Amino acid sequence: MSTARLNTTSKCPVTPVLERGALGFKLARVFRPCIDLHEGKVKQIVGGSLKDSGAGLRTNFVSDKPSSWFAELFRRDGLTGGHVIQLGAGNETAAREALAAFPNGLHLGGGVNLDNARGWLEAGASHVIVTSWVFRDGRLDFDRVRALVKAIGKERLVLDLSCRQRDGDYWVVTDRWQKFTELKVEEDALTRLAMHCAEFLVHAVDVEGLCLGVDFGLVEQLARWSPIPVTYAGGARSLADLESVTRAGSGRVHLTIGSALDIFGGNGVRYEDAVVFNRRQSAL
């Protein structure tokens, strides 16, 4: 499959090695791919601009390729552990097509709850990613977390702790990143939550989709505080960010690159270079 530049409309890690995960796959370390879905299409959206009303939406990229094309590409290159995120309604078909193209190779997030979590795993997701459903009235509901663990097992659960900065601290946000919760990203919270899941996914919402650089302050905190793997997303704009996140994250924080990647219409990072970077890390 060719990774030539797509015809699109566009504006714009644990140790860093491949190691066998709980389900028997090799999990891609350092660089993790992503497939963000909005209205059934693969898109790159500026973080924080997605609202229920649809007003003010800022889109960097809209692909003319189906979600399965990207999933097949990631499968070819052995990039397990990436995520498929449903940004609102109307994405279920595209999500299922991606999972079918790369069975047990991708995490699925967006609208996941106790009722449908197992169904997404049966559809081919290796893990499900949950955020808003485990919060009620801005507070983390541990009964819901425990119910998910009982239903699918902690080894297949990823908790999304995407956050925004307020008064010098990072606070988890839900509901398309619009609502602040009472959960602060700090050592005690990460240590407690790590007992109930396999990984964390953390979007730095303030820089997501802007290609203005990684929030290294957040990366360093995640590396210090999280006892389990973390995938960080937000602001990556060059291959040097992979190297920098590897250092700042002490090898425990993985990086997702979205809008800067050439397969998503960007000009900051060639997809092929990111794949080569991962392969070099696996040889260390």
Image (cartoon, grey):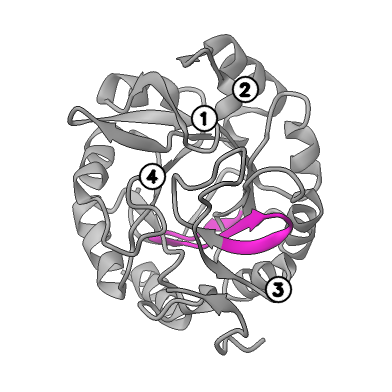
CA gap, disc 2 and disc 4: 27 Å
Q: Quadrant of the C terminus?
A: bottom left
CB atoms at circles 1 and 3 under 8 Å apart? no
Residue named by callout 3: 69
Q: Secondary structure at mark 2?
A: helix
Residue named by callout 2: 149
Which of marks 4 and 2 precedes in the sequence?
2
Which of marks 4 and 1 precedes in the sequence?
1
Q: Is residue 126 left or right of residue 80?
A: right
| Amino acid at dot 3 | Trp
User: Residue at image x 33%, y 63%?
Assistant: 236
CB atoms at circles 1 and 2 under 8 Å apart? yes
Residue named by callout 4: 205
Residue named by callout 1: 197
**Residues rendered magenta in the picture:** 25-43
* Main secondary structure type of the part rendered in magenta: strand
Image vertical order of residue 132 relative to residue 105, above or below: above
